[in-house]
Image (spheres, grey):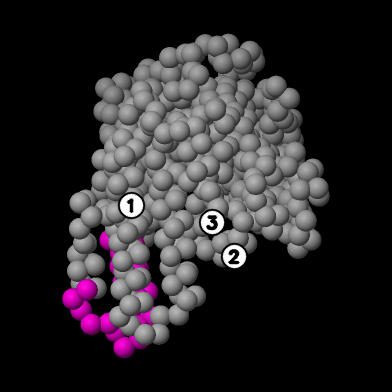
C-alpha cells in the first residue's frame, strides 16, 4: 500500500455552502411549490440535501478537514443551519408537518453533524501527515457528545447509532484518540467494551450498545476475542432479552467453527493461542501426500477472522487439497503491528511443513492464497530471508511453492507510524523483490481506493524485469473487492486462470 494510504469511514453529511449562502437544492425548495403531500415533499427535499452534500464532502474532504477549529466549525454550523432552515420553512408555510416527522429529521441531522465533528481531530491529523494535532481542548469529544446518552429513544435513529459507534471507536483508541485511528496500537476491541461500560449513560442505552458490540463485531473478529467481555456481561447487562441475544451470538461464534474438520494450535505467543483451521478432502487419510492450500484472510492487519476463508477452504478440499485457514495477530485485538502478522504467517507455513506427515500433505506442494492484507502475508512470506528477525526459528521453510493474490498491498513502506522502531521496507514486497520467487497469480481492481492500482502497476513492472513467473489480471472500474461487480465473463476467466495456475504448478 502506498505510504499513508487510509481507509476513511464513509460520510453522510448535509449541505454546506461557504459564506452561509443557499445551496442549489435550497433554492429549488424555496422557489418551487410543495408536493400535494407536504410530509412527502419535506422528506424528499431532506433526502436530496443529504445526497448532494455526501458528494460535496467526498470531493472536498481534504480541504474541509485541514481547517483550523474556527474555520471547521463555521463550515459545520453552516451545514447544520441549512437543515434547520428547510424544516422551519415547511413548518411555517405548510400545514400538516407533524411533530414526530420534525423531531425525527432534526435528531438525525443533529447526530449526523455530531459525527462530523467527532471526525475532525482524527482526520486533521491524517491530512497533516501525522505532524500536527488539531488545536482542540482535552474534553473535545465529550463536549461534542454532551446530552447524547440520557434519552433512550435516540437508539432508534440510524445517525445516532453511527455517531455513537464512531465515538466508541475514538474512546477505544486510548492515548491515541486525537490521532488518525487506522494505526492505533491498542487492544481496541476490549477497550471498546470497557468504554461502553464506563459511559455516563442510561442503563438501557448501555445494554443496547453492549448487545451491538457482540452482534455486530462477531462477524469481524474470532470468538476468542470476546472471551473476557462475555465473562462480564452477566453483571454489566440488565436487559434479559439482550443477555440472551449476546449468549446466542457468542455460541454461534463457537459453533460456526465446526465447519472445519479440525482446529490445531500452530503457535502460542505472549499467551495468545493461534489456530490452524483445517479442512480435509473426503476420504483423506494421514498417510496421504496431498497438496496444501493455505488461506490468509484480509482486514488491514487490524480486523478479520479465518472464518472468512471457510468457503474457499471447502472448495479447495472438494478439489482434493488439504485447505488450512490461519489465525494471526491483528491490531485491534492484540495491539500489534504488521510485523507481528508477518511473523505468524511465517510460523504458519513452517508449521505446515513440520507437520506434513501428520496432516497428510506433500511438504513440497504448499500453495499460499490471500486477499488484501492476507495476500500481503502470502507474498512477503516468500521473500523474507532472515526469519529470526521475526522470531521464527523453525528448521522448516516458510516459503510457499506458489502464490495467489487478490488486491495485494505491494508497497507498505511508511505504514504503522505509531511506536514503530524498524524500517517497514523489511515487510514491503516491492522493496524485497528478488529472483527465484515462487510462481504468482495476481488480481487487482483498477479503481481500488484501499490499495491503489499504482502499487500493482509498480510491482508488475518491477517483477517483469526479473525472471520470476507473474501472471495477472486487472479490472477497469473495479474496486478493492473486484469480484463483486465483474462481468460473468471476467469471473469465468478468473476461475479458469486459477484452475490452470493450480494445475500447472502441480496442486
The residue tagged with tag 3: helix, strand or loop? helix
> Quick one: label 3 or label 1, which is nearer the N terminus?
1
> In front here: 99 or 264?
99
The residue tagged with tag 2: helix, strand or loop? helix
Classify 10 Å Cα crowding around label 1: few (below 14), some (14-19), many (20 and above): some
In the shown orientation, is residue 2 left or right of residue 289?
left
> In front here: 244 or 67?
67
Q: Which residues are magenta?
A: 30-54
Q: Mark 3 highlights which residue?
A: 161
Q: Is residue 209 magenta?
A: no
Where is residue 229? Give x, y as percent. 73, 42
Residue at point 52%, 63% (across, down): 157
Answer yes or no: do the residues labelled 2 and 3 have beta carbons within 8 Å?
A: no
> In front here: 446 or 146?
146
Q: Which mark is residue 376?
A: none
Q: Mark 1 highlights which residue?
A: 77
In the shown orientation, is residue 182 left or right of residue 454?
right
Where is residue 447? Give x, y as percent. 30, 46
Where is residue 301? Give x, y as percent. 52, 33
Where is residue 306? Give x, y as percent. 61, 41
How far is the residue under mark 2 from the one under mark 1? 25 Å
Q: Mark 2 highlights which residue?
A: 153
Amino acid at each position: 500500500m502506498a505510504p499513508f494510504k487510509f481507509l476513511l469511514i464513509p460520510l453522510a453529511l448535509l449541505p454546506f455552502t461557504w459564506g452561509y449562502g443557499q445551496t442549489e437544492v435550497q433554492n429549488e425548495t424555496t422557489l418551487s411549490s410543495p408536493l400535494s403531500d407536504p410530509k412527502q415533499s419535506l422528506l424528499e427535499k431532506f433526502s436530496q440535501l443529504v445526497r448532494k452534500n455526501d458528494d460535496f464532502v467526498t470531493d472536498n474532504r481534504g480541504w474541509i478537514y485541514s481547517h483550523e477549529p474556527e474555520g471547521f466549525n463555521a463550515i459545520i454550523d453552516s451545514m447544520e443551519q441549512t437543515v434547520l432552515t428547510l424544516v422551519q420553512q415547511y413548518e411555517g408555510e405548510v400545514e400538516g408537518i407533524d411533530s414526530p416527522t420534525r423531531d425525527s429529521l432534526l435528531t438525525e441531522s443533529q447526530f449526523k453533524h455530531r459525527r462530523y465533528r467527532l471526525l475532525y481531530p482524527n482526520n486533521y491529523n491524517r491530512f497533516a501527515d501525522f505532524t500536527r494535532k488539531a488545536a482542540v481542548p482535552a474534553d473535545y469529544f465529550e463536549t461534542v457528545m454532551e446530552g447524547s446518552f440520557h434519552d433512550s429513544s435516540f437508539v432508534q435513529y440510524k445517525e445516532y447509532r453511527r455517531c455513537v459507534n464512531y465515538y466508541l471507536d475514538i474512546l477505544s483508541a486510548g492515548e491515541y484518540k486525537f490521532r488518525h485511528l487506522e494505526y492505533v496500537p491498542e487492544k481496541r476491541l476490549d477497550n471498546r467494551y470497557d468504554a461502553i461500560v464506563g459511559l455516563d449513560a442510561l442503563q438501557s442505552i448501555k445494554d443496547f450498545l453492549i448487545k451491538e458490540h457482540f452482534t455486530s463485531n462477531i462477524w469481524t473478529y474470532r470468538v476468542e476475542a470476546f472471551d473476557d467481555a462475555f465473562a462480564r456481561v452477566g453483571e454489566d447487562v440488565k436487559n434479559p432479552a439482550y443477555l440472551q441475544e449476546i449468549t446466542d451470538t457468542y455460541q454461534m461464534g463457537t459453533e460456526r467453527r465446526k465447519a472445519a474438520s479440525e482446529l490445531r494450535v500452530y503457535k502460542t505467543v505472549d499467551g495468545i493461542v493461534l489456530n490452524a483451521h483445517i479442512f480435509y478432502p473426503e476420504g483423506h487419510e494421514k498417510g496421504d501426500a496431498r497438496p496444501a492450500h493455505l488461506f490468509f484472510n484480509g482486514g488491514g492487519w487490524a480486523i478479520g477472522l479465518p472464518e472468512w476463508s471457510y468457503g474457499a477452504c471447502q472448495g479447495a478440499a472438494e478439489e482434493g487439497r488439504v485447505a488450512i485457514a490461519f489465525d494471526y495477530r491483528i491490531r485491534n485485538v492484540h495491539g500489534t503491528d504488521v510485523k507481528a502478522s508477518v511473523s505468524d504467517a511465517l510460523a504458519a507455513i513452517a508449521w505446515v511443513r513440520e507437520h506434513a506427515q501428520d496432516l497428510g500433505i506433500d511438504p513440497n506442494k504448499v500453495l499460499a492464497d490471500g486477499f488484501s492484507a492476507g495476500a500481503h502475508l502470502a507474498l512477503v512470506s516468500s521473500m523474507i530471508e532472515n526469519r529470526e528477525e521475526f522470531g521464527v526459528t523453525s528448521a522448516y521453510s516458510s516459503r510457499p511453492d506458489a502464490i495467489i493474490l487478490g488486491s495485494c498491498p505491494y508497497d507498505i513502506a511508511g505504514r504503522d507510524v505509531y511506536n514503530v522502531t524498524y524500517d517497514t521496507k523489511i515487510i514491503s514486497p516491492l522493496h524485497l523483490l528478488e529472483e527465484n520467487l515462487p510462481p504468482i497469480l495476481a488480481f487487482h481492481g483498477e479503481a481500488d481506493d484501499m490499495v491503489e492500482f499504482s502499487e500493482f502497476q509498480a510491482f508488475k513492472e518491477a517483477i517483469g524485469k526479473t525472471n520470476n513467473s507473474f501472471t495477472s489480471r486487472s479490472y477497469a472500474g473495479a474496486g478493492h473487492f473486484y469480484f463483486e461487480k465483474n462481468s460473468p465473463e471476467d469471473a469465468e476467466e478468473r476461475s479458469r486462470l486459477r484452475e490452470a495456475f493450480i494445475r500447472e504448478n502441480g496442486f
